[in-house]
Image (spheres, helix red, strand yellow):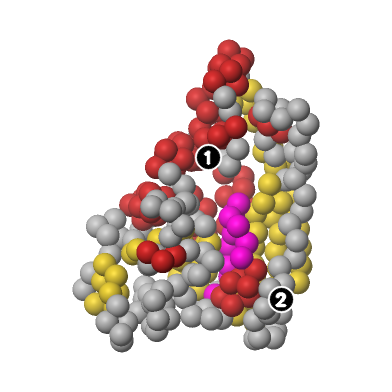
Amino acid sequence: MSLEYSCPLCSNSLIKTANMLRCENNHSFDFAKEGYVNLLPVQQKNSKQPGDSLEMVQARRAFLERNYYAFLQHELGQIISDIAANNIIDLGCGEGFYTQALANNTQATVYGVDISKAAVKYAAKRYSNCHFSVASISQAPFKSYFADVLVSVFAPLFTQELARLAKPGSTLVVASPGPKHLKELKEYIYSSVNEHTQIEVPAMFTQTSQTLITEQVTLNFSDVKNLIMMTPFAWKFRPEHWLALEEKGEHSVTLSFYITQFTRDKSVAVAHI
């Protein structure tokens, strides 16, 4: 498989030579032993170690290996299998659970991008059928109109960057929390739990379909702990919440996801958003 990255410093094409990528301005980026490449310049970092911490990545890997989210993974794979594509980008790929499912259902080249070095390291070490890079999804290291399909699973949506990356007429697939997703766990920390709403249609895209998938699962305390630790609200759980969760033992939890598809407008102009 060939690689088609752009230099994060000057935007010129990167050419693979030996164990590195290099552009015509002599900016070079080495491949790690796990197979990923770090394309995150210092000036694009918002902290010393941006993105998910190692602890969060380990919790996510442990939880996802239990296959509670396999029904979401399967749905995404089925969607991709019906789309003719050359290049697919998973924006905010994490440790690669969904990225490899995309690759298993297409002949396209699949790229996974995440700002967390820990997550990308885990992904590249396990899933050799994808290309992984450490990079910002708000300034992804690809040429404009490169992607036939963009996929976003629980990741922030940078609308102008989505419009820049997507070929006119291409597909954007977004997985986002459904109305009652994890409501039973949120009830431990919120007096009133607000339901998740549908995502807004990104500029220069048109919504073409939306599916809501839901499962009710029973989790033991270890699973619950890993699940919470991989969410944005983990920091809200205080010692007394963890104790209550542990004392209860098993928990019935709602897993609910919107899967929304969009088509990129035919115009090549990128809106200023």
Q: Pointer 1: what residue? A: 230
Q: Residue at x 70, y 64 (%)?
A: 261
According to the image, label 2 marks what residue? Answer: 204
Do callouts 1 and 2 mark residues in contact (Cβ within 8 Å)?
A: no
Considering every residue shown, the one lying at the far left of the view is: 18
Residue 70 is a magenta residue: no
Q: Which residue is drawn at 45% across and 72% down?
A: 141
Residue 260: horizontal and vertical position, in percent?
Answer: 71, 59
Front-lying residue, 208 or 28:
28
Q: What stretch is highlighted in magenta?
A: 147-158
Q: Where is residue 27 in the image (x, y as percent from the top left)?
A: 30, 78
Answer few, some or many: residues within 10 Å of disc 1's Cα (few below 14, many 20 plus, some between 14 and 19): many
Q: Where is residue 72 in the image (x, y as percent from the top left)?
A: 62, 48
What amino acid type is highlighted by mark number 2?
Met
Q: In which quarter of the image is residue 245?
A: top right
Q: Is residue 184 left or right of residue 52?
A: right
| 17 or 211: nearer the viewer | 17
| Place of residue 102 in the rendered image (x, y in percent of width and height, measured from the top left) | 52, 60
Number of marks? 2
Amino acid identity at mark 1? Met
Classify mark 1: helix, strand or loop: loop
